[in-house]
Image: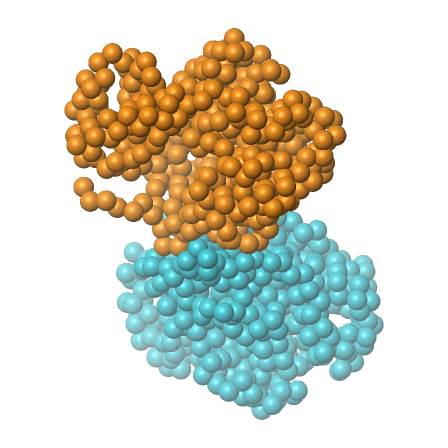
Chain colours: A orange, B cyan
């Protein structure tokens, strides 16, 4: 099939698309009315990131919710985790975050949460999608129609208080850390300044914290897009730098030299810090570094592996009552004691906490982590080639332990290879990890030759 | 008789029972169609009456307009005339009034206005409908969307305009009782009383989204329920009744007598014609012949058009504004040139009070100066396919009268007339007869029998 650009997707993960002729207010309204019908009449929390299309879509969403007899509670511009925490805390019927997360600014999307502030599970998502397609919406009459309420005060304080209750705030404040921040002019812009400066007494050097301005860089916080943050850390002599994505769930970190840490290492640092304070095991996806296993083992804890995807990690955390979870490559840290969602604030707090406790620099903390080398790549593939390809890979490494729960993961003496098909594009994603650069290159090269062959 | 329609999408806009006919999807698509019709560059005003469903409609209208790249200014709960005046004053590109006026609370509707706060022309209305049906909307790209802001000054600015036309200080002498029907007139009059210390007593003045105190129609029957009985005990000089968005008015005299809804137009014509350069009064074919008699006293003449706002708008557009003294219909909806031809019940009320002051007469004295006309109104279920034959039959039967077939059939004799037409809003045939003096009972009954005989 020819390669198409996906300007609109309506699927089990909700509705996402390029605003304009693709993601229209009518679609957002209908989807919200389906959501309102599904969760039932009652309060539904609605918030958004700083995308230009946010207010328009928020009106469309509120229209659909009101039409279904729900009472929208507008919380304004807030990070997705803040919206989730508030939804769960206030026992609303559900929540909707209007954000396309790390996607480019022309995109927008609806993230949907249940009454606990959790992403819908697979069954809920399927039911909602069926409801949407059947257009069998609840239609409130005049007497059942509620109005839009506002709460711009409670959610932020609630979120920050929860995060701070798990770290030694006194110790962090005493250090008056010099911190650099790049909030990509996103939903975290105001909250992060308040968190770091007001709550944690950091000496803050912030860029891109104006929610009225467009995203100044690629929205996804990856090492190659954070040169401004690195420069800021160096020029201001900061001890650490933080970068968020537009909806404040993902975190990237750079050390005091301005080097952006590998996301897997950030997760490993957070896991180490959390396991020192909380009992319980660890859940990560199959593509996350083995460094997590070593860190967990040093605390005598277990690591559970899941298919890639936040929902999978969250479900496993719930099932095993884990202390912490996350996904290495995408900068997601999930601390269930705060909330079962990716939360950049939890990541910031625990890294500062660890620095305060040890007196070590970030680079020193990172240097103490077990050393692994990772390679990532992707390749086009034809549908129908997948089965033979996976089998050929398995045959190429006869001694390996194979895990087929999400594509194919092969664990070898020297490291591992993970090959999986993207759910959204005709792409294979290939990851390899080993103790040495040479071994990582060798594993990755063998896998890529087969995939591209 | 079939169940009354729950949704009507016509050139006049969108109207229906919320949830049962009128849905969020209709609202969004209609707003997007209007956003596509309007030229870019100027904000669009949005206001609503206090019905509970109004917020849902407002959200949908805002989303549709913002998506088409228009900035939106939300006036909150505001009457239709306030919105129309604000459009012109704020040099907006157009406006949307959310409210079902004289329909029961469970209804809602969208009314659309162009620049200057004018009603859309027939051509524009039809284009809006075409865009709606095609659903090819001119959505702006993600970085060209509009922004919404709130504006609270529209009411005071509107009152300033009223104060420029009417001498409020001189009207303080009158004690006036007003039935606000829980609608926007309460907001307007409370503020008026506060600013100009008028002697007004408001009833049903609580802004209410669900349970209106009574049906929001402006006629003698509703005026007799709560308003009329208060007038004599309170020794008031007049009583007025408004619909929810206060574009229509019904009137009671100081004797506590509710006037026929037909009376507002002739009364205001009597006040307006001596003051106005224009000689023309525009009204529809179903409105009382008293209009002609009053107009004739002042050298004015009446232009009769089909029933419905659109025909009146088109007739207005076909004349120079200074040629027209007044336009209106026998429902209590009247528009005056001083207020740029906007149906405005509040302005109508002040015209009546000003006439009382200027003539030094009680309202009952003014009314008793007019000849008595008796009007009979009825409706019967519509059998659409029989209508042409019925109208032809009637035309033959009453060939002795003056025939007008612009809207159904109207036949005029020197002292009486009848009008048989199909309603635009319900599946019924309406029969109206009027006679100078006593009611034309025999004519009315024979017309009803004629329609009943259809199968």
- Residue B395 % position (x, y): 33, 75
Nearer-the-camera pick, B89 or A14: A14
Rendered image quadrant of residue B133: bottom left
Q: With respect to residue B224, does B168 lie above or below?
A: below
Nearer-the-camera pick, B28 or B294: B28
Instruction: Identify the residue at horizontal 77%, vertical 68% (top origin).
Output: B237
Specify the farthest residue to the top. Answer: A300
Q: With respect to residue A122, does A26 lie above or below?
A: below
Nearer-the-camera pick, B243 or A115: A115
Would residue B28 appear left or right of B209 to someone viewing this image?
A: left
Rendered image quadrant of residue B217: bottom right
Instruction: Identify the residue at horizontal 66%, vertical 72% (top origin).
Output: B347
Would residue B66 appear left or right of B178 to someone viewing this image?
A: left
Would residue A450 appear left or right of A133 to someone viewing this image?
A: left
Nearer-the-camera pick, B54 or A398: A398
Q: How many marks?
A: 0
Instruction: Identify the residue at horizontal 56%, vertical 34% (top origin).
Output: A255
Q: With respect to residue A283, does B212 lie above or below?
A: below
Visible in this render: residue B108? Answer: no
- Residue A79 % position (x, y): 56, 39
Visible in this render: residue B394? Answer: yes
Instruction: Identify the residue at horizontal 51%, vertical 83% (top origin).
Output: B302
Looking at the rendered image, the quarter that the C terminus of chain B falls into is bottom left
- Residue B279 % position (x, y): 56, 88
- Residue A203 % position (x, y): 69, 40
């Amino acid at each position: 099939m020819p390669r198409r650009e996906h300007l609109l997707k309506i699927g089990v993960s909700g509705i996402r698309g390029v605003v304009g002729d693709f993601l229209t207010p009518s679609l957002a309204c209908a989807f919200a009315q389906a959501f309102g019908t599904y969760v039932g009449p009652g309060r539904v929390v609605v918030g958004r990131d700083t995308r230009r299309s946010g207010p328009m879509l928020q009106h469309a969403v509120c229209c659909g919710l009101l039409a279904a007899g729900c009472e929208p509670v507008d919380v304004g511009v807030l990070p997705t985790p803040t919206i989730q925490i508030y939804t769960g805390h206030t026992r609303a019927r559900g929540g909707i975050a209007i954000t396309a997360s790390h996607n480019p600014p022309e995109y927008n999307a609806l993230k949907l949460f249940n009454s606990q502030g959790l992403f819908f599970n697979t069954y809920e998502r399927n039911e909602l999608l069926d409801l949407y397609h059947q257009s069998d919406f609840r239609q409130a009459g005049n007497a059942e129609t509620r109005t839009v309420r506002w709460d711009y005060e409670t959610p932020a304080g609630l979120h920050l208080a929860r995060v701070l209750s798990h770290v030694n705030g006194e110790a962090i404040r005493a250090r008056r850390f010099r911190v650099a921040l790049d909030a990509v002019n996103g939903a975290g812009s105001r909250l992060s300044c308040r968190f770091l400066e007001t709550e944690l007494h950091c000496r803050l050097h912030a860029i891109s914290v104006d929610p009225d301005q467009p995203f100044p860089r690629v929205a996804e916080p990856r090492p190659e897009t954070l040169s401004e943050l690195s420069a800021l850390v160096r020029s201001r002599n900061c001890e650490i730098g933080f970068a968020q994505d537009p909806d404040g769930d993902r975190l990237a970190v750079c050390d005091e030299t301005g080097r952006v840490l590998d996301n897997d290492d950030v997760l490993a640092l957070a896991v180490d810090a959390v396991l020192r304070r909380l009992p319980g095991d660890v859940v990560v996806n199959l593509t996350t570094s083995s460094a997590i296993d070593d860190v967990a083992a040093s605390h005598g804890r277990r690591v559970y592996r899941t298919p890639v995807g936040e929902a999978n990690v969250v479900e496993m955390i719930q099932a095993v009552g884990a202390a912490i979870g996350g996904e290495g490559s995408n900068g997601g840290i999930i601390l269930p004691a705060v909330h079962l969602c990716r939360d950049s604030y939890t990541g910031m707090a625990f890294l500062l906490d660890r620095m305060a406790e040890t007196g070590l620099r970030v680079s020193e903390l990172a240097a103490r982590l077990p050393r692994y080398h990772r390679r990532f790549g992707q390749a086009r593939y034809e549908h129908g080639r997948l089965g033979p390809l996976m089998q050929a890979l398995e045959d190429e490494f006869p001694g390996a332990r194979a895990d087929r729960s999400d594509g194919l993961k092969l664990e070898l003496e020297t490291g591992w290879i993970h090959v999986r098909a993207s759910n959204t594009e005709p792409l294979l994603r290939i990851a390899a990890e080993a103790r040495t650069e040479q071994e990582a290159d060798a594993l990755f090269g063998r896998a890529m030759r087969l995939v591209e062959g | 008789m079939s169940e009354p329609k729950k949704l009507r999408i016509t050139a006049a806009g969108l109207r229906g029972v919320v949830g049962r006919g009128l849905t969020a999807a209709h609202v969004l698509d209609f707003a997007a169609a209007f956003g596509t019709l309007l030229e870019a560059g100027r904000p669009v005003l949005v206001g609503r009456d206090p019905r509970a469903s109004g917020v849902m409609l407002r959200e949908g209208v805002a989303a549709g307009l913002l998506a088409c790249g228009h900035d939106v200014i939300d006036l909150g709960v505001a009457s239709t005339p306030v919105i129309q005046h604000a459009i012109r004053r704020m040099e907006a590109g157009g406006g949307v009034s959310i409210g079902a006026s004289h329909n029961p609370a469970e209804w809602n509707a969208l009314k659309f206005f162009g620049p200057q706060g004018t009603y859309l022309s027939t051509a524009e209305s039809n284009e809006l409908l075409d865009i709606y049906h095609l659903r090819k909307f001119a959505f702006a790209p993600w970085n060209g969307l509009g922004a919404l802001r709130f504006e609270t000054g529209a009411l005071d600015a509107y009152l300033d305009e009223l104060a420029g036309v009417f001498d409020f200080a001189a009207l303080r002498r009158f004690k006036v009782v007003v039935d606000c029907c829980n609608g926007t007139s309460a907001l307007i009059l409370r503020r008026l009383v506060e600013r100009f210390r008028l002697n007004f007593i408001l009833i049903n003045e609580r802004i209410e989204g669900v349970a209106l105190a009574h049906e929001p129609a402006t006629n003698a029957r509703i005026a007799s329920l709560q308003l009329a009985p208060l007038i004599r005990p309170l020794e008031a000089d007049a009583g007025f009744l408004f619909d929810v968005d206060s574009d229509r008015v019904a009137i009671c005299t100081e004797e506590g007598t509710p006037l026929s809804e037909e009376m507002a137009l002739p009364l205001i014509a009597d006040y307006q014609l001596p003051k106005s350069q224009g000689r023309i009064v525009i009204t529809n074919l179903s409105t009382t012949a008293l209009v002609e008699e009053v107009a004739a006293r002042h050298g004015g003449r009446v232009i009769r058009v089909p029933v419905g706002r659109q025909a009146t708008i088109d007739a207005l557009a076909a004349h120079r504004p200074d040629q027209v003294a007044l336009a209106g219909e026998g429902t209590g909806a009247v528009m005056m040139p001083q207020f740029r031809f906007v149906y405005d019940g509040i302005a109508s009320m002040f015209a009546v009070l000003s006439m009382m002051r200027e003539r030094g007469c009680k309202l009952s004295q003014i009314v008793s100066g007019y000849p008595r006309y008796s009007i009979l109104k009825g409706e019967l279920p519509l059998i659409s396919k029989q209508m042409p034959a019925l109208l032809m039959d009637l035309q033959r039967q009453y060939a002795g009268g003056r025939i007008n077939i612009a809207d159904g059939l109207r036949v005029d004799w020197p002292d009486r007339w009848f009008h048989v037409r199909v309603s635009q809003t319900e599946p019924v045939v309406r029969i109206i007869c009027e006679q100078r003096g006593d009611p034309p009972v025999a004519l009315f009954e024979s017309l009803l029998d004629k329609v009943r005989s259809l199968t």
